[in-house]
Every structure is written in C-alpha cells, then in structure tokens.
Image (cartoon, rainbow, N blue to C red):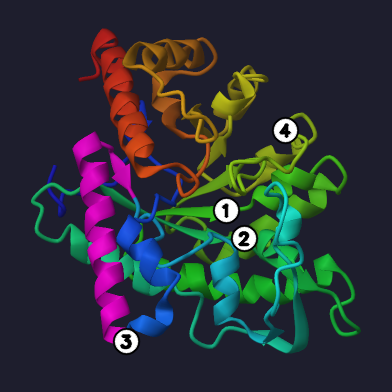
Amino acid sequence: MKKNDINYFQRKPLQTTVIGSYPLPGWLEFSAQNLDQFGPEDLAELQNDAVTTVVQDQLRAGLDMITDGEQSRLDFNLSFYGFLQGIKMESTTPRLFGPPAHDQRGKHQIVGQLSAPKGLGTLSDFKKLKQSVAHLDTPPILKASVPGPYTLSGRLLPNSDYIDRYAITEALIPIVQQEIVDLVNDGCQELTVDEPSMSCYAHREDPIRLVDIFNRTVAPVSGKVRLSIHLCFGNYKGRAVGMRQYKPMFPHFLEMDVNEVHLEMASREFSELDIISSIAKVKDVAVGIIDVKSYYIETVSDIADRVRRCLDYAPAEKLSFAPDCGLSQTARWAARQKLANMVAGVDIVRRELGLS
C-alpha cells in the first residue's frame, strides 16, 4: 500500500510493533555524556543520524510499525522535565552507589506555575521520524509516544500550590493535551500515551480516578488518531517497580478511551494471559512477547508458540505483538535480534492462518 492509500493506516491482524525507545548508538551515548564538547548543530546532526540508524534497524527487522527510538531522550520520563517551566531541576543524584534502583532518580522542586511553552519535544521528534522515511514508497506506520500526566507527575515534589500528586497531575493534563493535539495536527496516526505509573500503583490507588485522568487527557484527540496505552511495571535499569499484576486494574481500565491496550507478558512468564480475552471484547490488545529485561534471545519458534497461545484467548484481528517495554535498557545487538526473531515468528503464524 502507498502512503496516499486510504487504507494505509488501518490495522492488520497480528501486527508487529514497538513501544517507543530503542538503544542509543554508542556514539550518541558518548556525546550525551560529553555535551560540552559539541555545539548545538553538532548535537542536532548526531540525533538526526541516530534516528536514521534506529529506523534502519527497525526496517531490517521487518516491523509493521516503528518509532524514532526516542533518540533525543536520555530517559523516557526524565527528559521531559527539561521542557517544563516552574520547576527547579534536581542538582545531585540521591544515591550514587550500590545496586541500581528507582531511588537513584531524585525529584524536582516546583517553584512556580507549571507550563511548557515550547511543548515537550515530541513534535520535533516526530518530524524527524517522518523525514527519515520520506524516501520510501511504502513506509511503515509511524508511532509517537508521550508520557501521561500521572506518570510525569511522579518526579515532582508537592508544595503549597500543588498539594499532592493528583494536584500536580491536574496541572500537567493541559500540557500533555497540547502535545498530543500538536502531534495529531502534524499527521500522527498512531499515538501511545505511556502511563506505567498507573499500572505500577493501581493496586493502591483508585482505578476509577486513574481512568478519569486518562480519558480527560486524551479527550481532545479521541476519534482523530489511533490511541493506545502502555501498561507496564517499570524498567529502570532493567528492574520492575510495580506489583506486576493486572488484576487491580481490570475491569475498570476497560473504560479507558483507547483503541489498544499494551500489556507486559513475557517477563511475567505470561501470567494472567487470559486477561486478553476480556480486553479483546472491547479493544485491541498489544501483547508483550519479548522480554526486554532478559538477554535470552527468544527464538523464532519461541515467538510462534507464544503467538499461538495468545490466539487461544483472542482472534487475530484483535492482536498485535511487541516487546514488553521500550528497548532503551537493552543492548543494541540484543534488541536487533529480538525484533528480527519476533517478526519472523509472527510471520510463521500469519502464514499458518493464511494471512500472508
């Protein structure tokens, strides 16, 4: 199908996709750690080249849907705080030694009214992604991802004006809303709102309140873009932070105004896989069948078997497949092979079903 084909953006059964992030090429990571050695034009060139590199990795794997790999972000969540006004960035890391954990990421003080007059940076990222595939007659579907306001609120400290996390979240909703509106206006057809904090803390928070926050956030673009939500349990330095159970979220999260729900399954040995049955009755399901926390390289046969297991609970037209989470914490050599095997395994089942 060509770019101007009216059916180009329609979803096909057993689609292969990614969440958002991809490992930084070594030279980009070096430059990020030595910013004082590069000028702004140097850095822009480095990031543009990185997007081209990441896109090529995804195209070689054969993915149906790709992202820019979030090459302008050092961390999915943390990088966005540099765009916020009204905060004082954390000056020192709380803990420098010992095993990696979330407590090594401190929190920022709120010192004024929260705003983001220049946006959160995803619009320029999406423009780079579009440019990177402009030469292709039949490009893959392009996806953008943005952090949801509840997740984004997690590293900001309450104060007298923003008395708790929910007050901070409310202040961030219009900022995220504007970001997703700008993306849709720029032609984004596939948009993930990433809310891992909702899945991590649903067991101790009111899930109905979380659903309300999400639905109000995406309301301005509802029906104008294919929306998905990524519900994982954290992946900082390859470690989870949440309880790693979906039971506290459902059935309440079925009321989220999205077309697709992405679930982390591979790292959890496909525990609660039957939950995709109830989700598929009302939404599409993107099943995580690649474990980004493990350096075991899933074989093509592994992937095909996992896809067949999912088909026991949901029809092919409701399913897509992806890694459990973003790949930024996975070495690039492993990410490349995992994605290639994922596509090859899914293709086996497609052929078995007469879909290829």
Q: Residues within 10 Å of mark 4 (few under 14, many from 20)?
A: many
Q: Earlier in the sequence, mark 4 or mark 3?
A: 3
Residue in the picture at 40% in, 50% down? 23
Residue in the picture at 50% in, 35% down? 292
Q: Closer to the observer: label 4 or label 3?
A: 3
Q: Which residue is mark 4?
A: 244
Q: CB atoms at circles 2 and 4 under 8 Å apart?
A: no
Q: CB atoms at circles 2 and 1 under 8 Å apart?
A: yes
Q: CB atoms at circles 4 and 3 under 8 Å apart?
A: no
Region rendered in magenta: 39-66
Q: Quadrant of the C terminus?
A: top left
Residue 59 seen by the camera: yes
Is 182 one of the magenta-colored residues? no
Find the distance from the CA under tag 2 to the CA under tag 4: 19 Å
Q: Closer to the observer: label 2 or label 3?
A: 3
Q: Earlier in the sequence, mark 2 or mark 4?
A: 2
